[in-house]
């Protein structure tokens, strides 16, 4: 996410994932990153965050427990560490980040041979730009009724919603989540990376239609950028 002021935010930056052929090139090309937002401690969400942080000096934005679990202390500080219900005002208020619940797991693994360590509870994120759009990134989650409370405090313009099934909600439950929140645009995510993630944007779109959702479905291709 690039703000009108040119600041760069990354959310759950697993750039070297199996479906992004240019992931290593993108990782090498990253020069200026201001903040790295991480929803929970699983390896497909922490991704390349530590490497990027060390390389660019970007600050981690995460809950207190997750920040302590995955990052060298010099890359996280009080300004960018919070907890559920709390809002961080960054860059003199140009960006606000609010931590909201998600129903999932959060164990952090240092490597493939180590057991997971405590990473706190998983989160979703409300990222709002001053005089600009507000985004709701669900993180990995199931459907739950309190999602409806998100839009009481923010008019959600864009909802990034997991649809893959198996490890998160699938298309039907994701469509129900969109109806609870009522965003202007829904962008599906967390699907197609592995065979187990069977949910598809087409199935998600059909479920939105069944519910009479007024939200616009916007499917993004790998490596694509859009302007909002």
Image (tube, rainbow, N blue to C red):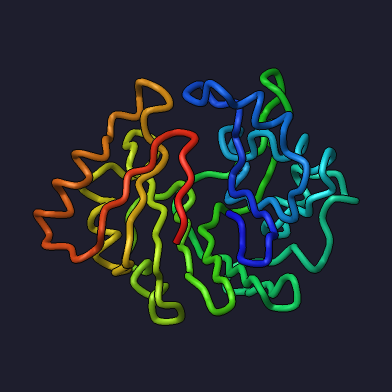
Residue 49, image x and y in percent?
A: 70, 40
Q: Is residue 77 left or right of residue 196?
A: right
Residue 63, image x and y in percent?
A: 67, 59
Between 228 and 130, the residue placed more toward the observer is 228
Relative vertical location of residue 65 with respect to residue 194 in this rendering, above or below: below
Q: In this view, does 220 lie to the left or right of 125?
A: left
User: In the image, what residue occupies the spot 55% across and 66% down?
Assistant: 127
Q: Quadrant of the N terminus?
A: bottom right
User: Which of the 4 image quadrants contains residue 178?
Assistant: bottom left
Q: Quadrant of the C terminus?
A: bottom left
Relative vertical location of residue 197 with respect to residue 225 in this rendering, above or below: above
User: In the image, what residue occupies the spot 66% across and 38% down?
Assistant: 108
User: In the image, what residue occupies the spot 83% across and 38% down?
Assistant: 55
User: In the image, what residue occupies the spot 35% across and 29% down?
Assistant: 197
Between 9 and 84, the residue placed more toward the observer is 9
User: Which of the 4 image quadrants contains residue 185?
Assistant: bottom left
Q: Is residue 212 left or right of residue 134?
A: left
Relative vertical location of residue 90 with respect to residue 143 in this rendering, above or below: below
User: Which of the 4 image quadrants contains residue 129?
Assistant: bottom right
């Amino acid at each position: 996410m690039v703000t009108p002021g040119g600041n760069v935010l990354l959310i759950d930056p697993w750039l070297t994932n199996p479906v992004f052929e240019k992931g290593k090139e993108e990782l090498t090309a990253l020069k200026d990153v201001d903040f790295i937002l991480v929803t929970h401690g699983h390896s497909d969400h922490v991704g390349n965050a530590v490497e990027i942080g060390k390389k660019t000096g970007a600050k981690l934005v995460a809950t207190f427990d997750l920040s302590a679990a995955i990052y060298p202390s010099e890359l996280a500080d009080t300004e960018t560490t919070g907890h559920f219900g709390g809002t961080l005002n960054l860059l003199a208020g140009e960006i606000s980040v609010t931590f909201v619940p998600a129903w999932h797991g959060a164990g952090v693994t240092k490597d493939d041979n180590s057991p997971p360590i405590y990473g706190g509870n998983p989160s979703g994120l409300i990222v709002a730009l001053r005089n600009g759009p507000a985004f709701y990134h669900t993180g990995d989650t199931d459907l739950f009724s309190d999602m409806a409370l998100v839009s009481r405090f923010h008019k959600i313009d864009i909802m990034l919603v997991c649809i893959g099934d198996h490890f998160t909600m699938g298309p039907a439950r994701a469509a129900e989540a969109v109806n609870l929140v009522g965003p202007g645009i829904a962008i599906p995510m967390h699907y197609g990376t592995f065979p187990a993630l069977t949910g598809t944007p087409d199935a998600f779109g059909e479920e939105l239609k069944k519910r009479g959702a007024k939200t616009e479905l916007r499917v993004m291709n790998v490596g694509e950028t859009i302007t909002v």
